[in-house]
Amino acid sequence: MNNKVTIKEINSKTDYNTFVMFPFELYRGNPYWVPPIINEEIETIDPIFNPVYKNADARFYLAYREDKIVGRIAAMVNWIEVNELNKRKVRFGWYDAIDDVRVSKLLMDQVIAFGKEHKLEFIEGPVGFSNLDKAGLLIEGFEERNTMITLYNAPYYQKHLESLDFSIQAKWVEYEIKISNFENSPEKIKRFSSVILDRYNLKILHFKKRKDILPYVDQMFKLLGETYNNLQTYVPIQDYQVQHYKDRYLKFIKPDFIKCVVDKNERLIAFAITMPSFTKALQKINGKINFFNFYHLLKAMMFNNRASFYLIGVHPDFQNKGITAIIFNEIQKLFNKRKITIVETNPELEENLAIQKLWKNYENRQHKKRATFTKTI
């Protein structure tokens, strides 16, 4: 039997499709892996479709044993991160492999070579091109399904990286929160929300149509940068990326699931984006959206007892002033109205204790943990 593993760099549309489809085979039958939407994955890595290549370079590799694919990886450089933030980092992402550390080593060797070619100093991942892409290797919670914007991987990935001398760079935690009826929800959240609204003369915006949200989307992305620009992982979001993410995700948004808070001058000072959970629907459509299976996505959007908490932004002038209480009070009302009883949080950096304190007001469990890994090259 030939155990030799060979690496192929890919750059054609056919190859991109093969690259994207590998996890579908690797995780076939795994009840916890949630397939991405195939066309969106291809458009993310294809320079023809993704404007991120204006400030990034990437290479994509497949590992073969004989004629069978046994691994994949992407090597990326975000030049804004390198040149403006002075982080001489080569990123790796789209990392998947069979349980053979030799395969992982050969894949990582390609990324390291790419980094050295550009005179970079360390490797880090799994990440995407920017902060709005999926990131973080799952290190706890392997019997939990991933959401639409998070990754899933087998437990042996961490062992592979550690055996290759990678160490943990940052950790993220995720929570599952139970939503009670409004009467039984935390009283101090309800009371504090009213006090803060009056104290700072703030107003809550409610949306009924997607077009009503559009005037605030650019402000949301700006506020996102102001909220997170001090975190270790943050890279400024470019205007062209904003449009790309509008095009990609706005179709999944339910207007009433977005909550915004403005001041007396109509300036956006806080927002939160939640969505119905698409996890089960994505498993059913298995990566393809068409006329016959769109029903599953529509059902998830309209009739669902689970939701996902994706993004929250608070202007620095209003951080630590109780603004999150306003947002969560409104979300509580929405979820009760929609008969949503469980919400999952987006990955939060482990050191982001302020937001995690908020979950302590609700019945919760930390059900997943993920990490990025790094080493000097």
Image (spheres, rainbow, N blue to C red):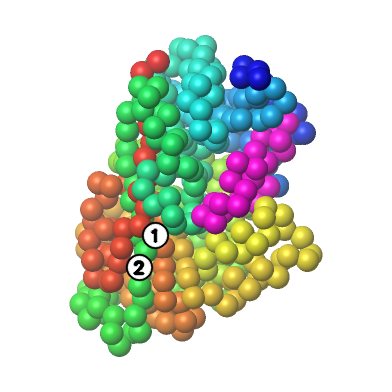
Residue 345 disc label: 1
Residue ID for mark 2: 177
- Contact (Cβ within 8 Å) of mark 1 with mark 2: yes
Q: What residue lies at 53% left-to-right and 19% top-to-bottom? A: 106
Residue 79 placement, left or right of 224: right
Judge from the rendering whether residue 376 lies leftward or rightward of residue 24; answer left or right. Answer: left
Indicate the quadrant where residue 161 lies: top left
On the question of residue 41 being in view, the answer is no
Q: How many residues crowd mark 2 within 10 Å: few (<14), some (14–19), many (20+)?
A: many
The answer to whether any part of residue 45 appears in the image is yes
Measured Cα–Cα span from mark 1 to mark 2 = 8 Å
Write down the quadrant of residue 346 in the picture.
Answer: bottom left
Q: Quadrant of the N terminus?
A: top right
Query: What is the three-letter code of the residue carrying label 1?
Result: Thr
In the picture shown, does residue 354 fall above or below 86?
below
| Residue shown at 39% from the left, 60% from the top | 345
Residue drawn at point x = 59 percent, y = 76 percent? 302
- Which residue is painted at 62% across and 48% down in the image? 28
* Kind of element beneath mark 1: strand
Could you tell me which quadrant the C terminus lies in? top left
Q: What is the x, y in percent for residue 265?
A: 38, 66
Q: Residue furthest bottom?
A: 183
Q: Image quarter for residue 310?
A: bottom left
Q: Is residue 351 above or below residue 108?
A: below
Camera-side residue of 11 and 313: 11
Across and down, in percent, residue 340 comes to 45, 77
Give the vertical position of 297 relative to 335 (above or below). Answer: above
Q: Residues within 10 Å of mark 1 (few under 14, many from 20)?
A: some
Q: Which residues are magenta?
A: 15-38
Disc 2 marks a residue whose amino acid type is: Ile
> Is disc 2 placed on a helix, strand or loop?
strand
